[in-house]
Amino acid sequence: MTTMNALMVEAIGKPIVLGERPIPSPGEGEVLVKVTVVGLNPYEHRVRDWGLYVEGRLPVVIGNDIAGVVQKLGPGTDSFNLKPGDHVFGQTNYLKGSSDQAGLQEYCLLDAYTVAQVPANLSDDNGASLVCNIVAPFWAIFGADGLALPFPLAEDAATQSFDYTKQSIVIIGAGSNCGKYAVQICALAGFGTIIALADLRKNGAELRQYGATHVIDRHAENQQGETRAIVGDELIYAFDAVNVDHTLGISMLSNTKKGTLACIVPGKAEQAEKIGKKEKGFEEKFVQGQSHNQPELGARFWRALPGWMAEGRVKATRWDVVKGLDAAKVNEVLDTYRDGKVPPRQVHVHL
């Protein structure tokens, strides 16, 4: 067999379609994977409907959050402890601009340094559930372009000199998939105070299980006031997982100390009069959660992640399933994101 089925964007703003394309061969540092699970995210709708990152190279295959079975290893992969038959998960390298590194097809390529083995006590779905949903907040909080906090490993020298137990962070949009993983990685790092803003009725108990020390209802009239009642005027770290308007996150930052809001949705404070008097100023940073933007961080993260999962320190969020490369059903999910809504759970495509 030299060709395979794939779901492709052939025209921006139009439904994806089922087609055929060649099965790729792994190059330097790459792994060929038989795809078993692909997690769908808002990113896929942005490619289909906006043409995000794909100008001039249609048709393109979509799907970033991938799990599958190793089929073949390319040259330069001997040090990664991978072999055919291993169940793995990983993130596509959009910098290569190739549909070979996309998930909604029978086989795909992944860079070996951003691949992790699925822990023996977990499933491919557990792996596919994480990927972009955990990479985005991790890069925002620990990446050089975000809050730039020390990597959360106890043996890391920078972490040993940074007392996370004395630190506070606010996570806005904590009920989203990225928000839930943000809570988990902040708990993993050992933050003393983790304030999650989410729908209290729907997500409160789950977020506390993940490590939130406080959950504030996103419907509350005075979320800023409730936050300041917990941390006073000391907050210097905040993360927004969902909003284009960054007013709320900036308003919660200290008025007397310089604070930073890291975001994974581009935007700005649209209501400047509500952010308060920031005597020391503030920083507002948009971060692209992509493993390949910072290769050293990416390699360390993907080495550590399976251990965190096996130990139960990082837990997959829940998912629903679409069976097969069903263009109509996948388009329905992407339409939901396009229309500003969110599926009840992340949707996984099973191949």
Image: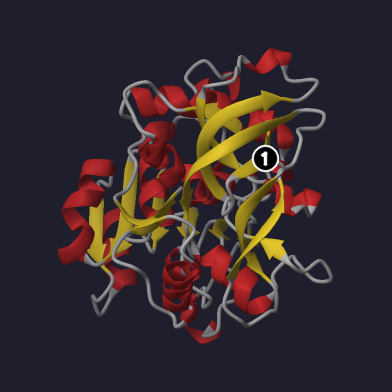
The correct choice, above or below, for 45 with respect to 257 in the image is below
Judging depth in this view, the residue of 37 and 313 nearest the camera is 37
Q: Position of residue 67 (x, y in %)?
A: 50, 39
* Position of residue 39 in the picture relative to residue 145 (left or right): left
Q: Position of residue 15 (x, y in %)?
A: 57, 78
Residue kind at label 1, given as amino acid type = Met
Quarter-wise, where is residue 135 in the image?
top right
Q: In this rendering, is residue 228 above or below 236?
A: below
Against 114, residue 326 (above or below) is: below
Q: Secondary structure at mark 1?
A: loop
Give the residue at x 33% y 47%.
194
Drawn side of residue 346 relative to residue 338, left or right: left
Q: Position of residue 91 (x, y in %)?
A: 60, 43
On the picture, is 220 further left or further right than 93? left
The residue that appears at 42% across and 74% down in the rendered structure is 332
Residue linked to disc 1: 1
